[in-house]
């Protein structure tokens, strides 16, 4: 087991924490607008607001999903298996990790999965 690779994970941890902060900040700026549905506006306004709410809900969903991925990646950093593909066990390329620090799979496995 090469121990020298461990020190290389620190920048990714910083990246992950930074991204996590950004997501949490944006969640504060744009809170979910669930209370809107409690009002009873006319039909047109209702449709518009429902559509807006839908987009907001989807954005919130994506954000939550990304936060979960980031938390998962941070756990893997702590465990020491960060940067290893969860599917084939191969190493995820540094370029890929730089672009997507929370990537679980190497490029090959990711493509296989998205094709299915
Ligand atoms: Zn793989």
Image (cartoon, grey):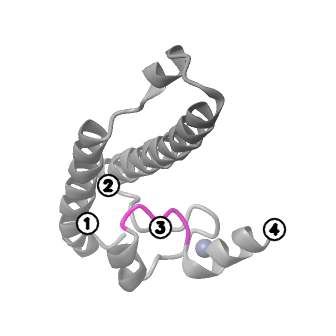
Look at the image and give the residue range highlighted in magenta.
101-105
Q: Earlier in the sequence, mark 1 or mark 3?
A: 1
Residue 98 rendering spot, x and y as whole percentages: 32, 77
Position of 41 relative to 26 (above/below): above
Residue drawn where x is 55% and y is 68% of the image: 105
Residues packed near mark 3 inside 10 Å, few (<14), some (14 to 19) or many (20 plus):
some
Per the image, the residue denoted by label 4 is 116
Residue 26 rendering spot, x and y as whole percentages: 27, 47
Residue drawn where x is 39% and y is 53% of the image: 73
| Mark 4 vs 3: CB contact within 8 A | no
Q: Which type of secondary structure does the marked residue at label 4 adopt? A: loop
Per the image, the residue denoted by label 3 is 84
Residue 81 rendering spot, x and y as whole percentages: 41, 59
State left or right for residue 8 relative to residue 94: left
Position of 85 relative to 41 (above/below): below
Q: Earlier in the sequence, mark 4 or mark 3?
A: 3
Per the image, the residue denoted by label 2 is 77
| Mark 2 vs 1: CB contact within 8 A | yes
Q: Earlier in the sequence, mark 4 or mark 2?
A: 2
The Cα–Cα distance between marks 3 and 2, rounded to whole angstroms, is 10 Å
| Mark 4 vs 2: CB contact within 8 A | no
Residue 103 is one of the magenta-drawn residues? yes
Q: Which type of secondary structure does the marked residue at label 1 adopt? A: helix
State left or right for residue 75 relative to residue 89: left
Q: Earlier in the sequence, mark 3 or mark 2?
A: 2
| Mark 3 vs 2: CB contact within 8 A | no
The residue carrying mark 1 has its beta carbon less than 8 Å from ligand 1: no
């Amino acid at each position: 087991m090469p121990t020298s690779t461990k020190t290389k994970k620190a920048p990714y941890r910083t990246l992950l924490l930074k991204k996590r902060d950004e997501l949490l900040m944006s969640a504060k700026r744009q809170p979910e607008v669930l209370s809107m549905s409690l009002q009873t506006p006319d039909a047109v306004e209702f449709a518009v607001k429902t559509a807006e709410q839908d987009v907001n809900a989807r954005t919130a969903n994506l954000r939550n999903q990304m936060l979960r991925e980031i938390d998962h990646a941070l756990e893997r950093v702590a465990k020491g298996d960060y940067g290893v593909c969860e599917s084939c066990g191969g190493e995820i390329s540094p370029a890929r990790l730089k672009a997507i620090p929370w990537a679980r799979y190497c490029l090959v496995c990711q493509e296989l999965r998205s094709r299915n």
